[in-house]
Amino acid sequence: MLQPRLAGRYAKSLIDLALERNQLEAVYADMLFLLSVCKQSRDFVNLVKSPVITADKKNAVIDAITKGRVNDLTAAFNKLLVQKGRESILPEIINAFIEQYNRLKNIHKVKLTTAQPISEELRKAIEQKVKTDTALTNIELETVVKEELIGGFVLEFDNKLVDASIIRDLRDIQRQFQNNVYIRNIR
């Protein structure tokens, strides 16, 4: 069950504590590491969400995965989550932390979806174009490849969508033919 408000509160507490101890960048790096663990291992996510596995075993697994790889503050935070029985929302807390960090540092996520992988040169050109056209200074560009677009691109940023894909154009044409717009205009 998703609990975004609770995850946001835990993330905010962790950010405040990290700022207080001047360890924000280290904790952010730890959150990126934990995010990659969650993305790579569905078993890890299932383990922390499982109500059947005891807190001791969850704590041991989390310690084994993070030992020597995360900051002491992050390790203590993970132990606190397990102690309070909130480890099941760890993936949500990680995402909420990253969102709040980006908001704090004024970093804007931009997602570019293309039909083919793009070169680094084109990636930088698109990044520069977005910066000049939108007045966003800090951009984190994520590229995704979806062959079903056929061609073109889809750009998402700040709750805006720019869809310049071939598949969208084809769907628009299909919709026009289904509505018989051309036949009505002839008569």
Image: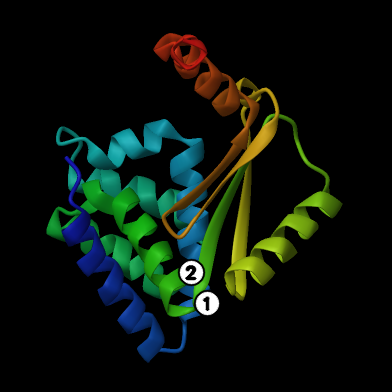
- As drawn, which residue projects farthest toward the front? 187
Q: Residue at x 48, y 9 (%)?
A: 183
- In this rendered view, identify the residue nearer to me: 185 or 176: 185
Q: Is residue 57 above or below residue 86?
A: above
Which amino acid type corresponds to the residue marked 1 in the rendered image? Glu
Which quadrant of the figure contains the N terminus? top left
Query: Where does the image place residue 173, in percent across and percent down from the top left?
Result: 55, 19
Could you classify mark 1 by the number of other residues whose Cα lies within 10 Å: few (under 14), some (14-19), or many (20 or more)?
A: few
Q: Is residue 73 above or below residue 50?
A: below
Could you classify mark 2 by the number of other residues whose Cα lies within 10 Å: few (under 14), some (14-19), or many (20 or more)?
A: many
Which amino acid type corresponds to the residue marked 2 in the rendered image? Tyr
**Side of 2 where 28 appears, left or right:** right
Q: Quadrant of residue 129?
A: bottom right
Q: Quadrant of residue 58?
A: top left
Q: Residue at x 46, y 89 (%)?
A: 22
**Side of 78 where 159 appears, left or right:** right
Give the residue pinned by disc 2: 28
How many numbered tags mark residues here?
A: 2
Give the residue pinned by disc 1: 25
Query: Where does the image place residue 132, in percent across and percent down from the top left?
Result: 68, 71
- In this rendered view, identify the residue nearer to me: 85 or 1: 1
Spatial CA distance of label 1 from label 2 is: 5 Å
Asked if one can make out residue 29 in the rendered structure from this viewpoint, the answer is no
Q: Secondary structure at mark 1?
A: helix
Q: Are marks 1 and 2 in contact (CB under 8 Å)?
A: yes
- In this rendered view, identify the residue nearer to me: 16 or 26: 16
Q: Secondary structure at mark 2?
A: helix
- In this rendered view, identify the residue nearer to me: 140 or 122: 122
